[in-house]
Amino acid sequence: MSPNFATKSSESMEKLNLFFILTPFMGHAGQLVELARHMVKTFDHITATVLVIKLPGDKIGTDYTDSFTDHTRINFIHFPPMDLHLFQHCPTLGFRVDAVINHHKPIIRDLVASAATGPGPVGALIVDMFCTTMTDVAKEFNLPAYVFFTSNAAFLGIMFHFQTLQDELGQDISELSHSPTELQVPSYANPVPPTVVPNVLLDRDQWSKRFLRYARKYREANGIIVNTFQELEHHALRSYDGNTPPVYTVGPLIKPKKPTPDHKVLQWLKGQPESSVLLLCFGSRGWFGVDQVREIAVAIERSGCQFIWSLRRPSPEKLNGFPDEYADYNEVLPDGFLERTAEKGKVVGWVPQAEVMADVATGGFVSHCGWNSLLESIWYGIPVATWPIYAEQQLDAFQMVKDLGLGVEISLDYNQMNKDQQLVSAETIEKGIREVMDRNSAVRAKVKEMSAKSRMAMEEGGSSFESLRRLVEDIM
């Protein structure tokens, strides 16, 4: 890259207005907003218009996206929230998201049409991985469309692999759940046990009506932008077939924080020794039943470590809803737990995870293995103990532990969609906690090394910086 590429005056380069279309999940939306901010900050000639869709029933997600406000060369257009009752027919939360996005398609088409003929015409649409229906809008106005893939390069690879198996070889993907042998998937370095392949790929409806359609649309895009970096996923990134559009690695993009300077947990952390605190946090949709909560409590107490535990109340809709806060944690915790651990830790509801991870007192992370969370663990050099819950998290956990050696295992295949899911025992949880908090472990050393590489990737001349530069050149 020429040293003045990112700082050329706006007069010397053609203006480029990019439309970013967000999926109404907090983790997805945050990553794409961070990409918009990063592009605008890096390239003087780029402006961004960010279209923010709200998901009915998701109060925390809506509060988070409401915090997005205009600033230099970024304009946010917030669509009003819709009535949850309009989407009661949707069998799962994922189908609800698709329905909400489709409802906004005509509105977004009109916005693009208006912008396409106005001053500073639209240069491209950058759409979230679940907003692929919006590529039709780009096609109508002869605009390039790029997919922003908020998961990792390995999961993109298995989506393409399964799509090829079905479309070219006639494979019934749902049958793979009964495979007597491990699966050979090009984007994973090790054979993949069928037990870690998520429901969204193996369930007939989820696959055929959602993820297969997404994968086909990805093939049609001008490019795929992935929130990862070459040094982390070099194996997966080399595995794609010849029908894959250009792939741009631009990460790790850490989703923007919502300001929470006075949060009681952050104040408590300030007084704790370096790398002494375990964070247990399971994402915006993570929750456990009472019996599993009590196993976790027993494990924490036996481990003797200092801790912050984000404990959320299940939604009445279970997997189709979002967890809420407990009025009294004693209703689910073992008798006396809060009193016995009062000097050791904090049980809280929603927690500002990234801020906790950034604090030097945090030394380990028990996580649901959402990709945002795993990128944060790498960025801040905090080893993770894996406990996947839903979506593609089982594969994320498998990759972190088996392929990359950046995590320790509590579970790789825990799945709340599985009606026969067994409890994870206190003994298993305690073992994972002790391993993830081991200050001299090989995993901790490897995570610290990858953390340094992640930061270098984002600097000028780094792999992700150069990939972003190529993306902007290709759009122009």
Image: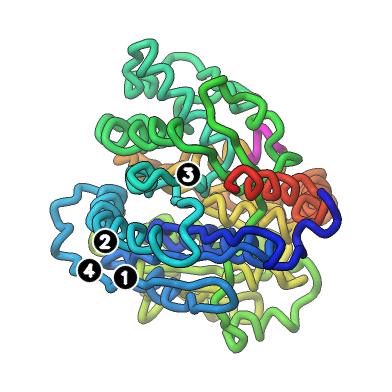
Q: Is residue 318 visible?
A: no
Q: Is residue 252 left or right of residue 3?
A: left
Q: How would you rate the neighbour count of disc 4 (Cα within 10 Å): few for under 14, some for 14-19, many for 20 or more? A: some
Asked where in the image residue 56 lies, by quadrant, the reply is bottom left
Cα separation, mark 2 vs mark 3, equals 19 Å
Question: How far across and down, in percent of the image, does residue 189 sit?
Answer: 65, 25
Q: Front-most of 156 and 272?
A: 156
Q: Magenta region's main secondary structure? A: helix
Q: Earlier in the sequence, mark 3 or mark 1?
A: 1
Query: Identity of the amino acid at label 2?
Result: Ile
**SS type, badge 2:** helix
Tell me where residue 192 sits by quadrant.
Answer: top right
Instruction: Please provide percent x and percent y for residue 166.
Output: 36, 18
Q: Residue at x 56, y 50 (%)?
A: 371
Q: Residue at x 26, y 35 (%)?
A: 209
The image shows residue 33 at horizontal and vertical percentages of 53, 64
Which residues lie in the magenta part? 400-404
Point out which mark residue 144 bears.
3
Residue that badge 1 annotates: 79
Instruction: Give the residue type at disc 3.
Output: Pro
94 inside magenta stretch: no
Residue placed most toward the observer, 52 or 402: 52
**Secondary structure state at the residue bearing disc 1:** loop
> Which is more toward the observer, 86 or 424?
86
Q: Secondary structure at mark 4?
A: loop
Give the residue pinned by disc 2. Answer: 107
Q: Which mark is residue 82?
A: 4
